Amino acid sequence: MALHPGFELRLTTSLPSSLQRTRPQIAGLVCLALALPSLSGCMLDGLTPVGVPQTPDAFLGAKPISAWPVSTDWPRAFGSPELSHLADAVVQGNFDIAAAVARIEQADAQALQAASQLYPQLDGTSNAQRTQVPGTTRTTTGPFKTTASNMFSLGISASYALDFFGKNRATAEAGDLNTVATAFDRDTVVLTSLSSLANSYFSVLAAQDRLRILRENIKSASEILEAIKARLDAGTGTALDTAQQETLLANQRAQVPGLEQTLQQTRNNLALLAGRTPETSRIAGGSLRSLTIPRVRPGLPSELLLRRPDIAAAEARLNAQNASVKAARAAFFPSINLTGGLTLESLTLANLLRPEALATSLALGLTQPIFNGRNLEGLEKQAEGRYRELLGDYAKTIVQALTDVENALIAVRQTSEQVRLLGISVQSARRAYDITNARLREGTIDVVTLLNTEQSLFNAQDALVQAQLARAQASVTLFQALGGGFSLPRVLTGDAIMASEPAVQPAEDGQ
């Protein structure tokens, strides 16, 4: 896919093409003169993107089939009740999600401010004034007499900007689209938070599995050490054999604190994701072997544009900036303001509500920019440059999303194969260890052979757990790359509801 970013700036008017090539300020005056009688004339369009990357027909790592709509509870697909409970807690209590919701409220408030220019502005006024005029200002010879007078007024004023060239409409549209983009940003934060939760939870399970294997091996190594000491006491063993086994045992015990540290710190991170303190959170965990690995269908690449919230947010921001370009173009044209006022004025409060106290005003004003140091030209170029920047971001987001899915599909496929092969390795290492241990007790082999098979079994078991962790996290990455999970439609009493896809892939741990 090659990117060919291009742009076309369109100015659609009812003017001759020769006039459209003049300075926008002059074109605006002429356009206004031609259009006022019929209330139709200049309509401004923004930038039109050209060369947005096209999606391929299929992913390289999957069949070209269509997938079902997105589901928001995809962590449940791994079959862990505790993970599902934590996912609900994250959606409700995560601090990043709460901040994203607050940003939506801010964007919505800004959109309301931008849209307020589309409506008339009404202001009520009231005034009570007493004025004292010194007598020295009325005569120079006297007698000097100070006079005082009262003035009471009650009124309402209205103003309305005729959005003839669409500047206010474009500004309001940009505000609405920015709110939409902010809402999609919130969805991205939710997806990222849930992905971090799942990966951290699986790390807890992996640490528990590794600790379980390590303690089992420590127990076996301790039993073997006792057997070697018994041979030493009987005169059939050596002090070297004892020292070698003690070294192996000490090395295994030394790995426990590091795994315990990882386990406890990851549990604390899970509490933070759920918006809790470590003291108030209890993570039981379990084993990676208890998980079910979902079989996820990525669907068609074109469907990714509708699933990924980051793509939707980039598109909304691009459209918002397009509206901002329209507003920047419309700023070259005249602004028309209609103002009116209705006021009651009287020297005495008793006469304030009499019909004779009524004063009215109505005015139509027009302002046309003529020279402002090329400020408007600079604002227009800035808006167009920002549009081109967002178009590049939008194209990159699409390509990045397709790349993420391909990489996730590769990771899922390769980690699954790695788990299968390591399962075979663990089984072979287990058989070798059992045979060696039995022959050691019979006295037919030396301790070095036992140490090698013992270490090989532990390494194979530990590598298998880490491969299982990588496989589970690869599935999480695929969910995240696809913008969430999937649901199957089901019809119940005539209404379509969403039900989780039952197809899962059983774990192949080989243990």
Image (tube, helix red, strand yellow):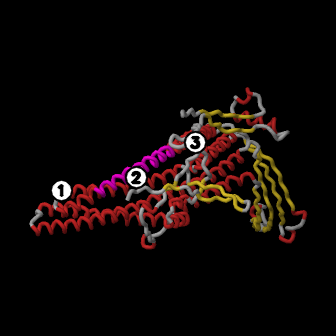
Question: Is residue 433 shown left or right of residue 126?
Answer: left
Q: Is residue 92 above or below residue 62?
A: below
- Disc assigned to residue 419: 2
Residue 489 visible (yes or no): yes
Q: Please name the predominant secondary structure of the magenta segment in the image.
A: helix
Residue 401 vs residue 451, the one in the foreground: 451
Q: Residues within 10 Å of mark 2 (few under 14, many from 20)?
A: many
Instruction: Tell me the residue that label 1 is attached to.
Output: 448
In the rendered image, residue 239, in percent from the top left (x then y), is placed at 11, 63
- Which residue is found at the position 19% from the left and 64% from the top? 441
Nearest to N terminus: mark 3 or mark 2: 3
Q: Give the number of the mark in front: 1 or 3.
A: 1
* Residue range (magenta): 404-431
For residue 429: magenta? yes
Residue 373 vs residue 242, the one in the foreground: 242
Q: Residues within 10 Å of mark 3 (few under 14, many from 20)?
A: some
Residue type of the residue flagged with mark 1: Val
Mark-to-mark CA distance, 1 and 3: 54 Å
Residue type of the residue flagged with mark 2: Val
Instruction: Tell me the residue that label 3 is attached to.
Output: 64
Q: Quadrant of residue 230?
A: bottom left
Residue at the top extreme of this rendering: 18
Mark-to-mark CA distance, 1 and 2: 29 Å
Determine the secondary structure under disc 2: helix
Mark-to-mark CA distance, 3 and 2: 26 Å
